[in-house]
Image (spheres, rainbow, N blue to C red):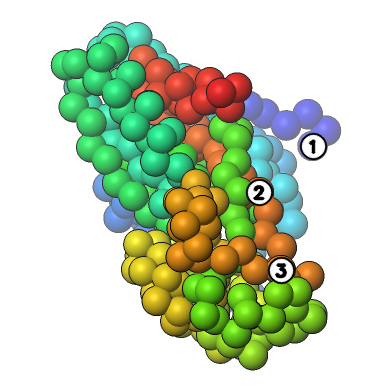
Amino acid sequence: MSDPGTPTFDQLRVFLTVVDTGSFAGAARKLGRATSVISYSIANLEMQLGVSLFDRETTKRPQLTDAGRAVLSEARTIANGMGSLRAKVKGLIEGLESEVHLVLDVMLPAWRVVDALKAFRETYPTVTLRLHVEALGAVTQMVLNRAATIGISGPLDMEIDGIERIGVGFVELVPVAAPSHPLALAGRNPPGAGREHVQLVLTDRSTLTQGWEFAVIGTRTWRLADLGSKHMLLREGIGWGNMPLPMIQEDLDTGRLVRLDMPDCKGGPYRLQAVHRTDSPPGPAASFLISRFEGQMAE
């Protein structure tokens, strides 16, 4: 078959649901249809395209063929595009959002948060704002799970299906410790010195980046779910760790914390990105927030 037919959007939706649920029966339950209808729809799709999408012979559960995996990528692109189209039209019909769920990375400097939210309150006084604060991959996870409309996330060096990203600058991370800490007393530390002392590390509660390590070099670590707790323990001399510079600048100025000289852990920029689902583009109020965070880069 040299000229494949044109599948319907419903056929592609059935195909994607079978892939996501792992079985024809699972897709039937999710879509509220009979299993035979799901099987018939997939058979028609395969006939139209002229390829077998699933291997039904060698396994009990349908497994994608090589052709099926190739079609899957395109099918998801079409589904995302259709979702985006529907969402945009919905926004045109409904107009301004009644509320916006915003999730922010805990590393975002306080002045940027205050600036954006004050401007939002003045511009959209009738829109309810629900604010969440998370760390690392948990920001994008909330947007992906539709628990938040938009987010300002730290760097995720991986492609995530269904997520759009817009760069909104960065915040400088620096390794610090209390002045009484051995790493602070040593002045310039040799490579590997940080591994000999407890490193305080912010915990990532997201399944997106489960098992990943972000700027962790210590073999002895204490895991903390709250950046404020990490800040407190650092000032008390319990370990060392990386912190956003705006948050601890006053501590550096007063000597309560010392910036560490460590050749293998110099800190650096922590990239920030505005994120939203491709099938749920931000409405006027959410778009305003993204633009505000973008505009702060020039300040």
Amino acid at the residue labelled 2:
Pro
Q: Which mark is residue 254?
A: none
Residue corresponding to mark 3: 261
Dot 3: element: loop
- Distance from disc 2 to disc 3, alpha carbons, whole Å, reads 17 Å
Q: Which mark is residue 1?
A: 1
Residue 176: x and y in percent read 57, 67
Q: In this view, does 31 lie above or below 4?
A: below
Q: In which image quadrant can residue 205 be found?
A: bottom left
Q: Extreme front residue here? A: 254
Query: Residue placed at 41% from the left, 29% from the top?
Result: 280
Dot 2: element: strand
Q: Which of marks 1 and 2 is nearer the N terminus?
A: 1
Residue 163 visible in this rendered orientation of the protein: yes
Dot 1: element: loop
Work out whether residue 236 or residue 91 is closer to the camera in this orientation and state it.
236
Q: Which of marks 2 and 3 is nearer the N terminus?
A: 3
Q: In this view, does 144 lie above or below 202?
A: above
Q: Extreme right residue here? A: 2
Q: Which of marks 2 and 3 is in front?
A: 3
Query: Residue placed at 39% from the left, 41% from the top?
Result: 110
Q: Which of marks 1 and 3 is nearer the N terminus?
A: 1
Give the left or right position of residue 263, taking residue 11 as reference. Answer: right
Query: Residue placed at 39% from the left, 76% from the top?
Result: 236
Q: Which mark is residue 269?
A: 2
Q: Residues within 10 Å of mark 3 (few under 14, many from 20)?
A: some
Query: Residue placed at 46% from the left, 44% from the top?
Result: 108
- Distance from disc 1 to disc 2, alpha carbons, whole Å, reads 53 Å
Amino acid at the residue labelled 3:
Asp
Residue 129: x and y in percent read 23, 31
Work out whether residue 167 or residue 23 is closer to the camera in this orientation and state it.
167
